[in-house]
């Protein structure tokens, strides 16, 4: 397997950063994540310019400024020493400007540009990688758009509404020579990493079955996107957090 380029390694480290604040950091990743939770391909560096290079942080733009960005993606970018937040996108420009102002202060003054459309952000030459943090219904559209602009992509889970959308996303990333990761971050939780090591070492014998449980309460208003049957309901939206780690650990 070819080794990933510097910009891809920084994207993978950012993916690894998405773990609970109370948990110890996941081990550094030296190679692309296994197939199934991400699609990666070695690509030429996109940072070889006057504004960046192999020794520069990955410049990240985020499409979608909802709860997952506020509580997970943005803090993770700031916590990653190899990444910096440079651009955000939201249709409500007033809220986007408020977000940018708050997070500019939190990251120590590095400027964060504001865009009203995904097209604008993806065309921004200061952005190396795009985090797609929107509803599942737009994951394919924005991933393909970002790839067409030569941006690496970290997409919120679930990856897509069906295998056809997912395949088009992978194909677009491969055609553009960029990395595509999906935020099935629980594969990198310390307990999953430890379980994988124990299984690989044969410490618990042959694994023939996996049993898991996931439950909770979520108030979903009528008409909310999470209630759209096309995205697969709770099995795809939440239970994927249990489904994704199992084959990785095995």
Image: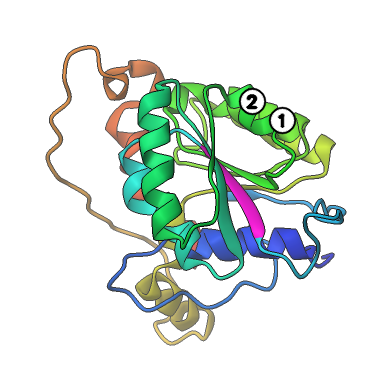
Judge left or right: residue 148 versus residue 59: right
1 and 2 marks in contact (CB < 8 Å): yes
Q: Which mark is residue 120?
A: 2
Q: Is residue 98 above or below residue 208?
A: above
Check disc 2 and report its element: helix, strand or loop.
helix
Quarter-of-image position of residue 53: bottom right
Counting from the top left corner in percent of width and height, residue 104 is at 45, 52
Quickly name the residue at label 1: 123
| Main SS class of the magenta portion in the image | strand
Q: Residues within 10 Å of mark 2 (few under 14, many from 20)?
A: few
Q: Which mark is residue 225?
A: none
Residue 169 in sight from this viewpoint: yes
Residue 164 in sight from this viewpoint: no
Counting from the top left corner in percent of width and height, residue 231 is at 40, 24
Q: Is residue 97 above or below residue 24?
A: above
Please check the rendered image and state whether residue 162 is part of the magenta-colored stretch, yes or no: no
Q: Is residue 197 above or below residue 227?
A: below
Counting from the top left corner in percent of width and height, residue 175 is at 83, 35
Check disc 1 and report its element: helix, strand or loop.
helix
Residue drawn at point x = 53 percent, y = 79 percent: 200
Judge left or right: residue 134 versus residue 226: right
Q: Where are the magenta residues, as a range?
A: 58-62
Q: Real-space Cα distance between discs 1 and 2? A: 5 Å
């Amino acid at each position: 397997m070819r080794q990933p380029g510097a910009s891809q390694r920084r994207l993978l480290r950012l993916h690894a950063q998405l773990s609970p604040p109370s948990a110890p950091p996941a081990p550094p990743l030296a190679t692309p994540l296994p197939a199934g939770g991400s699609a990666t391909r070695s690509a030429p560096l996109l940072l070889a310019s006057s504004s960046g290079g192999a020794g520069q942080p990955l410049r990240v733009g985020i499409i979608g400024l909802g709860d997952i960005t506020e509580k997970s993606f943005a803090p993770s970018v700031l916590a990653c020493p190899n990444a910096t937040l440079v651009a955000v996108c939201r249709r409500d420009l007033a809220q986007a400007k408020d977000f940018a102002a708050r997070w500019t202060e939190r990251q120590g003054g590095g400027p964060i540009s504001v865009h009203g459309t995904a097209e604008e952000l993806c065309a921004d030459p200061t952005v190396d990688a795009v985090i797609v943090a929107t509803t599942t219904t737009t994951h394919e559209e924005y991933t393909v758009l970002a790839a067409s602009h030569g941006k690496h992509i970290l997409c919120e889970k679930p990856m897509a509404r069906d295998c056809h959308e997912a395949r088009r996303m992978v194909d677009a990333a491969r055609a553009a020579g960029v990395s595509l990761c999906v935020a099935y971050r629980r594969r990198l939780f310390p307990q999953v990493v430890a379980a994988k090591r124990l299984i690989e070492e044969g410490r618990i014998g042959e694994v023939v079955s996996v049993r898991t449980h996931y439950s909770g309460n979520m108030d979903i208003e009528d008409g909310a996107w999470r209630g759209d049957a096309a995205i697969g309901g709770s099995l795809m939206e939440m239970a994927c957090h249990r489904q994704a780690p199992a084959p990785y650990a095995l």
